[in-house]
Image: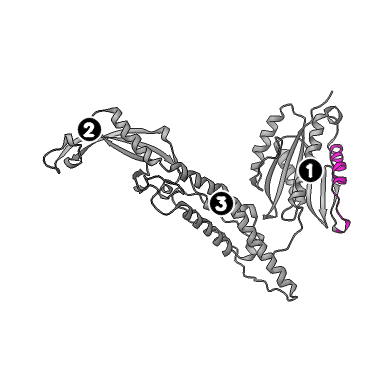
Amino acid sequence: MKIKLYAEERLKDFLDKKKLEIKDIIESETEEYILNVGEEQYIEYLKNKFQLDVPELHTDEVYIDSYEKEILGKDCPWEYRITDPYATIKRDVIVYHVPYSGSIELLKYRPSTWSSWAGYEIQIDKQAQAIIVEVINFYNDPEKINREFNDSLKRIMSSYDNLKSEIEAYNNGLESYIRYTLNERRQHILKKRDFLSSLGVPLKKNKNTPQTFAVPKPKLRDKISIRPTVDKNGFTPEPTLDDENYQKILKLINDIGKNFERLPSTYSNKKEEDLRDHILMILDPNFEYGSASGETFNKSGKTDIQLRYDSSVVFIAECKFWRGKKAFLETIDQLLSYLTWRNSKASIIIFVRNNDFTRVLQIVKKIIKEHPNFIKELNDSDESWFNYIFSLPTDQNKEIKLAVQLYYIPTYK
């Protein structure tokens, strides 16, 4: 296989077409699907489908072999020219293999800035996953052979860094673009439904909405992206605790937990309920909700803190001492069973008496991904405050945000 470097359409145009494909896919989904699908799962599906495999040239892993070849007289250097230009002489060919990974075909696109070597043709051995550079040995001069190879490598690398950085920028911005496009479509649908409802005429619902499960036909070495299914026909608007207040609540819990760590003699012998009540005592006066909304912090059961709207929980914090992997996963099950609405928010607050606190943090980050409702790991907010996306057991499209906040409270004697 041969390709001409940086010689086809502009890379920017190619990437813009990819984004347009994403937009077209989102626009082609039914309204019910867009309103009901789990946002993070759908974003991850499109991200996996459209993320580009950046070509990586492993120039530090170059290896060589050789073979003999008959060279036409007309292709020899002048001092080797023979009378008949079509007669041949036998010479060794030194073959340099430059290993690569990723989609090597992307090297044919032109980055925003490219060199005069655009159009230089290279040979690809896809089976060996290497770029092939051949140098004919006319002079038995290792320095001259290496110089010829390095000149070829310089042509190959001439615009490589620019191309690679543009592809990486596209990949890094892909999630934000998909999220924005999806939310724009969702908001447009909701506004349209609000307008139609204001007309006072009942809306006709399509009972034949197809429940689809699509697996794109995989090509060789491609990842398989599975489109999330939607099990519900109807969409019901649900109240949610906004992200700003969710983060304020978690920040306050984190401040309280750090205070527990600073004063171990005061808190080390407290029970779970006592520590929960202390957190609740600080949270309640810091967040004021009107009684008409039905939102209020309260305790339900032995160790949890809840923020309810009508009869359902929109935020819950579960307080537990660390008792190992099994108990931790059971706590997640217990917490998820309280939640019924999309976009609910939650926190698991773990008090750790073990002296190997760092080891506990590592265990939590590893085993939480084993839970069947785990979807995605988000950025950590602190060294012991981790954030995740989970689905509800009753509906995989209902996604919740779950924080896990751990605090070291050793036994004080």
Residue 323 percent coordinates (x, y) = 75, 34
Considering depth in this image, is 171 or 228 the residue closer to the camera?
171
Residue 284, compared with residue 186, is above or below; it is above
- Asked whether 27 falls inside the magenta stretch, the response is no
Circle 3: residue type: Lys
Q: Residue at x 75, y 72 (%)?
A: 198
Q: Say which quarter of the image contains residue 342.
A: bottom right
Task: Describe the element under mark 3 as helix, strand or loop.
Answer: helix
- Residue at numbered disc 2: 138
Residue 215, image x, y percentages:
52, 56
Asked whether, in this view, residue 234 is left or right of residue 63, the answer is right
Label 2 sits on a secondary structure element that is loop
Q: Which residue appears at 81% of the width and 27% of the height?
A: 411
Above-or-below relation of 403 to 409: below
For the residue pair 284 and 87, the one nearer the viewer reads as 87
x, y percent for residue 155: 37, 41
Report crowding for label 3: few under 14, some 14 to 19, many 20 or more residues within 10 A (C-alpha).
many
Which span is picked out in magenta?
Answer: 273-292
Q: Which mark lies nearer to you, 1 or 3?
A: 3
Looking at the rendered structure, the kind of residue marked 1 is: Glu
What amino acid is found at the position of numbered circle 2 in the picture?
Phe
Judge whether residue 137 can be spotted in this image. Answer: yes
Secondary structure of residue under mark 1: strand
What label sits on residue 47 in the rendered view? 3
Q: Earlier in the sequence, mark 1 or mark 2?
A: 2
Within 10 angstroms of label 1, few (less than 14), some, or many (20 or more) residues? Answer: many
Q: Which residue is mark 1?
A: 318
Looking at the image, residue 201 lies above or below residue 126: below
Label 2 or label 3, whichever comes before in sequence order: 3
Q: Is residue 351 left or right of residue 48?
A: right
